[in-house]
Image (cartoon, rainbow, N blue to C red):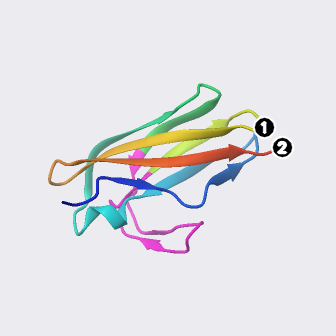
Amino acid sequence: MARTSVSAIPDIEKAPGDSQTYACNFTEVLSGRSLSGSPTVASDDAGLTVGSPALNSSTYVDDYTGETVAANKAVQYACSAGVAGTTYKVTITATSDDGSTIVGYQHIKVRSS
């Protein structure tokens, strides 16, 4: 049975005032499949603002791993705010082209400015 979840390594760090796009790469668990449909993203705490999830529509290079990620293999989302010194858990949920639900987790640590 194929894995259905993935965790980003290492944790992502941001400053409280940063507003950026982050991505969760699902290539490892897709095993030749692709993502489809409309992904969702949620933070475990309202102090971190996440939203606008979308499948990556083109190839990109992952800033943390240096890996080239093919189209429809990752979910990109907007992230802003957060309290300095707090680590948030973000849950990213997507559907593969065979209908499987795949869940990813990322930890975003908000550092002091």
**Which residue carries the number 1 mark?**
84
Q: Is residue 38 magenta?
A: no
The circle drawn on residue 112 is 2
Mark 2 touches mark 1? (CB < 8 Å): yes
Q: x, y (%) of residue 11?
A: 61, 55
72 sits left or right of 50 in the view: left
Front residue of 21 and 15: 15
Residue in the image at 18% along x and 54% along y: 97
Dividing the picture into quarters, in which one does residue 71 lie?
bottom left
Q: CA distance from mark 2 to mark 1?
A: 5 Å
Residue span colored magenta: 54-75
Dot 1 crowding, Cα within 10 Å, few <14, some 14–19, many 20+: some
Q: Using the rendered image of the protein, determine whether residue 19 is visible from the camera's viewpoint.
A: no
Query: In the image, what residue type sits under mark 1?
Result: Ala
Q: Earlier in the sequence, mark 2 or mark 1?
A: 1
| Quadrant showing the N terminus | bottom left
Residue farthest right in this picture? 113
Q: Is disc 2 placed on a helix, strand or loop?
A: loop
Q: Vertically, is 15 above or below 12?
A: above
Residue in the image at 47% along x and 38% along y: 52
Q: Is disc 1 placed on a helix, strand or loop?
A: loop
Q: x, y (%) of residue 3?
A: 28, 58
Dividing the picture into quarters, in which one does residue 30 lie?
bottom left
